[in-house]
Amino acid sequence: MHDLGQTRSSNRRDHLLLTPDTFVRTSMPGIERGVAIVHVSPAVGAGFTEYTAELESGGFMKPASTQRFVFLLSGSVVVETSGSHALEPGAYAYLPAGLDCKIAARKESRLVVIEKPYEPLAGVDAPGVLIGYEPNVPSTPLMGDEDLHVRSLLPDQATFDFAVNTMSYQPGAALGQVEVHVMEHGLLMLEGGGIYRLGDCWYPVAAGDFVWMAPYCPQWFGALGKRAAKYLIYKDWNRHPLG
């Protein structure tokens, strides 16, 4: 039965909340035997594209012209470059622009995909392939708060022009301030839920929701419920605002 047009999804000038009930699956060039849920793109003013790729067993993603970050949510895939790298849930890969690389599903799989044109920096080499596993990345408390931990999935090095982190909140934990800054975010809720302040709006959010925050969008999150909350978050990074 239809919910009479009701949804938690919202599209505002400086932020976007997309909930699974409003996801639309579509074919996309470069994806064979699979579909994409495009969460955010330059069509709303973002400087990057983020989507969930859903691949059938035997489905695959062709090489991209831009740099690409993938995080496996479920299933099993192989990243085929000069060698083969098997990814299980929680594993991720950074793939440089123009790399001859195929991502093939060994069974039905779901991946978060972030794509962004690379911004070179004078005197700094572009990054190479990086394969990682999120649980193995050291976890550090944010601003000394032991109830709020961050894992940085990409090295904090000038060669990278964006960052991808996971942030985990114990029930009742919250950001220590309302943040307002030049960086934009793409955020996928992985576990739990809570309340997100975006601009002048307050939203309940839960696992599966996607949030985009434009530069200078006021933002704050607090975890609610009896289980920890966790999200995967992108931000542009390490480059001067004037380019």
Image (cartoon, rainbow, N blue to C red):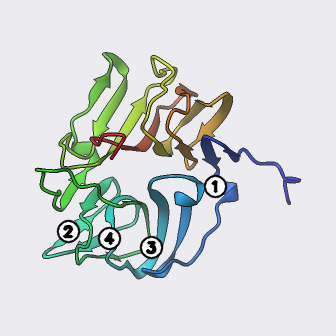
Q: Is residue 171 above or below residue 44?
A: above
Q: Is residue 105 above or below residue 24?
A: below
Quadrant of the rendered structure where residue 61 is?
Answer: bottom left
> Which residue does the numbered mark 1 point to in the structure image?
20
Horizontal relation, residue 145 to residue 5: left or right: left
> Which residue does the numbered mark 4 point to in the structure image?
77
Query: Can you see residue 96?
Result: yes
Q: Nearer the viewer, residue 170 or 95?
A: 95
Q: Amino acid at mark 1?
A: Pro
Q: Nearer the viewer, mark 3 or mark 2?
A: 2
> Which residue does the numbered mark 2 point to in the structure image?
85
In percent of width and height, residue 106 lies at 34, 76
Q: Is residue 219 above or below residue 109?
A: above
Tell whether label 2 touches label 3 (CB within 8 Å): no
Label 4 crowd (10 A; few <14 / some 14-19 / many >=20): many
Q: Earlier in the sequence, mark 3 or mark 4?
A: 4
The count of marks equals: 4
> Disc 1 and disc 2: Cα gap in Å?
30 Å
Q: Amino acid at mark 4?
A: Val
Q: Amino acid at mark 2?
A: His
Residue at x-position 33% and y-position 63%: 68
Q: Earlier in the sequence, mark 3 or mark 2?
A: 2
- Residue located farthest toward the right when viewing the structure as drawn: 4
Label 2 crowd (10 A; few <14 / some 14-19 / many >=20): some
Query: Can you see residue 40?
Result: no
> Which residue does the numbered mark 3 point to in the structure image?
108
